[in-house]
Amino acid sequence: MFSYQLYSSRNFPPLSETLKMVAAAGYTGTEGYGALYADDAAVAQLTAALKETGLSMKTGHFSLQMLEDEPEKVLAIARAVGIEDIYCPYIMPDDRPTDAAGWRAFGARLEKAGKPYRDAGLGFGWHNHDFEFKALPDGSIPQAAIFEGGPNLQWEMDVAWVIRGGADPLPWIEKHKGRITAAHVKDIAPAGENKAEDGWADVGHGTVNWPQLYAALRAAGCKHFVMEHDNPADHARFAARSIASAKKW
């Protein structure tokens, strides 16, 4: 049920040891990100390490540039490691629109970028941070505009970033039932704590009401639950404590 976003362990090489740790902690799956499939050698290493540990990789993050410019390469990677749902994870501040029309156009751009992947039978969508929930000058919310421009986009909802963006996740979950195919499961430390870890916490040890949100996401049709911590001091600690918490929900 729970997979592990390998970005959480980017500061703890090598990948082969990380995957052994993830499997030993009780996870059955992983989520990939760009550096893991930077070239053919990296993809071969990733594929072999997944096979060795028995872990799956049903979801993966790919940059917008790669998704638009190299669809055949993305599809080859997806086939090699078994990815079923692809998510575009981020755009840099300088590339972000400044009004609702711009965000609708961005949604349409994502919709177009996703066509080769949908045509190949894969899911395709967007993964949010906090900036999509910061109100624009006219009061509208970028995330809503993205979905207006991209009506067929799936959503990997990063719940903790929604909260950091100032929004209540529950109404968004209710409104987008069927669209939310994955969720990032991470937690926010109490104010002023865990500064060395950018204010994040191990899941179940922070301020996010995960039992309630997990139930809501499952009811909304979410199928991938991906543990993530953006900057853990100890990735093995985070992996173990978080899945232990989640098993109680």
Image (cartoon, rainbow, N blue to C red):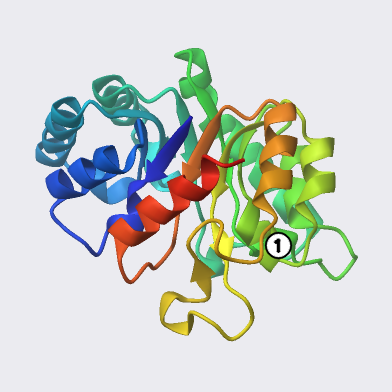
- Image check: 131 left or right of 5? right
Question: On the image, numbered disc 1 is attached to which residue?
Answer: 163
Q: Position of residue 193 (x, y in %)?
A: 54, 82
- Quarter residue 13 falls in: bottom left
The residue positioned 33% from the left and 72% from the top of the image is: 233
For the C terminus, give its image quadrant.
top right
Please state the horizontal and vertical placement of residue 180, each as a whole percent of the image.
66, 34
Question: Is residue 61 among the parts visible in the rendering?
Answer: no
Label 1 element class: helix
Q: Is residue 175 above or below residue 65?
A: above
160 or 74: nearer the eye? 160
Instruction: Classify 10 Å Cα crowding around label 1: few (below 14), some (14-19), many (20 and above).
Output: some
Three-letter code for the amino acid on which mark 1 is drawn = Ile
Q: Is residue 104 above or below residue 113?
A: below
Relative height, residue 161 to residue 32 (above, below): below
In the rendered view, would you say 64 is above or below 47?
below
Residue 39: which quarter of the image?
top left
Q: Residue at x 57, y 27 (%)?
A: 223
Q: Residue visible at 64% across and 52% down? A: 159
Residue shown at the point (64%, 81%) measured from the top left = 191
Number of labelled discs? Answer: 1
Q: Residue furthest front?
A: 248
How far from the left and from the top, in percent, is residue 129?
A: 59, 58
Q: Say left or right for 102 vs 52.
A: right
Residue 246, given in percent of the width and then of the height, sits at 53, 44
Quick check: 113 left or right of 66?
right
Q: Is residue 160 visible?
A: yes
Q: Residue furthest right?
A: 138
Which residue appears farthest toward the bottom when viewing the image? 192
Say which of 167 and 248 sits in front: 248
